[in-house]
Amino acid sequence: ERDAALAEARDLQQQLAAARADLDVARADVERAATSSGNLQYALEAFQAERDAEIGIMEEQRKEQEEGTAAAHAAAILAINETNQAHMNQIQQAADSAVKNVMAEVNSLETKCEEQRKEN
């Protein structure tokens, strides 16, 4: 009976040792899983930070491009306005010259009419 009890005790000790070994393996697996999870979380945060930085750069580039386009359009409009104003000035000068010529012609005709009246 004693031998059976010793055999059972040895069997239980072996089972306990195996259970402890399994527990150590499970603890190591949990530790590796926690480390992997932390590494993945760090990598995810790094990717998100990089993505946010790239989005910021793209938004800044888009804003600069829009500002550049707006400035180019404003410069083009200004140039067109200046060209139109120059054309308007030329037209105004031509009209003024034509009016002067007509006025001179009218004066000349009035003078001729006066001379004709005097002769008649």
Image (cartoon, helix red, strand yellow):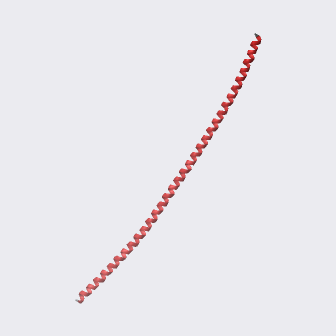
Q: Residue at x 55, y 50 (%)?
A: 58
Q: Residue at x 44, y 68 (%)?
A: 83
Residue 34, how many percent across, how many down?
A: 64, 33
Foreground residue among 51 and 110: 51
Residue 119, how many percent across, how many down?
A: 24, 89
Which residue occupies the extreme left position in the image?
120
Residue 54, how many percent across, how many down?
A: 57, 48
Residue 37 sits in quarter: top right
Q: Quadrant of the C terminus?
A: bottom left
**17 with respect to 101 (left or right):** right
Which residue occupies the extreme bottom position in the image?
119
Q: Residue at x 31, y 83 (%)?
A: 108
Vertical placement of 34 versus 99: above or below?
above
Vertical placement of 32 versus 14: above or below?
below
Residue 8 sits in quarter: top right
Foreground residue among 52 and 89: 52
Which residue occupies the extreme top position in the image?
1
Q: Quadrant of the N terminus?
A: top right
Which residue occupies the extreme right position in the image?
3
**51 with respect to 29 (left or right):** left
Residue 93 sits in quarter: bottom left
Residue 29, how many percent across, how many down?
A: 67, 31
Q: Residue at x 74, y 16 (%)?
A: 9
**114 with respect to 61 (left or right):** left
